Image: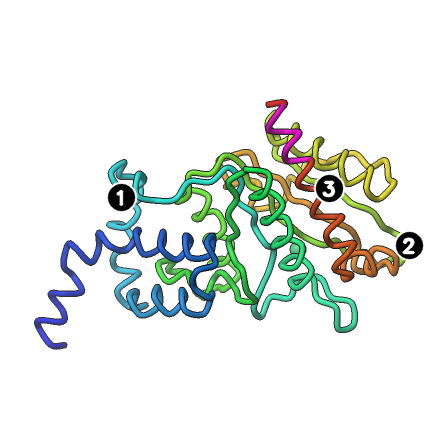
Amino acid sequence: MNMFLHRLRRSRWLRQLRPLLTAVTLLSMVGHAVPASASHAVSLTMLPAAEEASNEAVDNQRLDDPRYSRALPSAEVLIDIGHGGVDGGAVYQDTLEKDINLAIGKKLYLLLRSSGIRAILNRDGDYALSDDNRWHGSRSRHQRDLSQRSQLSKEIDTALVVSLHVNWSSSERVHGPLVLHQPEGQSTLLASCIQLALNEQQHKHAVPRLGKPFYLLKVVQSPAVIVEMGYISNGHDRAMLTNPRTQLAVADAIASGVRNYILLR
Ligand SMILES: [Zn+2]
């Protein structure tokens, strides 16, 4: 390798720049100033894959450095849009969970922002988060995806994480919303607020549940919940989750749940 290039890649300023680039990518998503593909191009050109693994330890150290955390964006709510890219999530014929999560997530983002709550989306297009996660050594895309989701909540100073999903059952009759929480009071309160609002919107009486086996709920430090907004396998739920007007009603219910939590906590 050209010695100058080699030195440049190893140089201090480039390593220092990396967390800031992540921040720029995220900020561009927030402001919608740059389309997702363009913001990806920034991080991917600046982050050659081979360099990433060797610098992992250095990067982890730097992310913990208080000087850098000040430069990163902060948000009240991180909206984690479940799945993306080759990972479609739950499927019913040509209806994909990832598309529903994204459509409702964008509406939720706008509703929260319009009521003065600083929200951030972890993806605003159809791509897998693992595509962006070049510093994780794992060859498994699923592992990189999960690690990226948890890494995001560490990098952004976020008060709570709302992860959007759609349920699936082998029985077409099973329907309704279900919110999963961490074994912790704040997460349980957040789950109860969102469940209550979704129950009202969908005329249900479901109770939130402890989401034990979910990786995201285990690793995310801030209060986090997984919102299963309905069942893709149920005709009524599927119609509600794919129609823009009722998608807005679902997003509105989740937003009011989040607002109630913020008032109560
Ligand atoms: Zn899902």
Tell me the residue at 48%/64% (across/down). Answer: 140
Disc on the earlier residue, 1 or 2:
1
**Mark 1 and mark 3: span between their CA atoms?**
40 Å
Residue that numbered label 1 is attached to:
61
Q: Is residue 229 above or below residue 14?
A: above
Residue that numbered label 2 is attached to:
173
Tell me: is circle 1 under 8 Å from ligand 1. no
**Mark 2 and mark 3: span between their CA atoms?**
23 Å
Give the amino acid type for the residue marked by disc 2 in the picture: Arg
Most common SS among magenta residues: helix
Q: Is residue 71 above or below residue 130?
A: above
* Boundaries of the magenta span: 257-263
**Mark 1 and mark 2: span between their CA atoms?**
50 Å
Disc on the earlier residue, 1 or 3:
1
Position of the C terminus by quadrant: top right
Give the amino acid type for the residue marked by disc 3 in the picture: Ala
Please tell me how crowded label 3 is: few (under 14), some (14-19), or many (20+) other residues with Cα within 10 Å: many
Q: Nearer the viewer, mark 1 or mark 3?
A: 3
Residue 132 picture location, percent across and down = 42, 63
With 262 as the anchor, is 171 left or right in this view? right
Tell me the residue at 85%/50% (across/down). Answer: 175
Tell me the residue at 86%/58% (across/down). Answer: 234
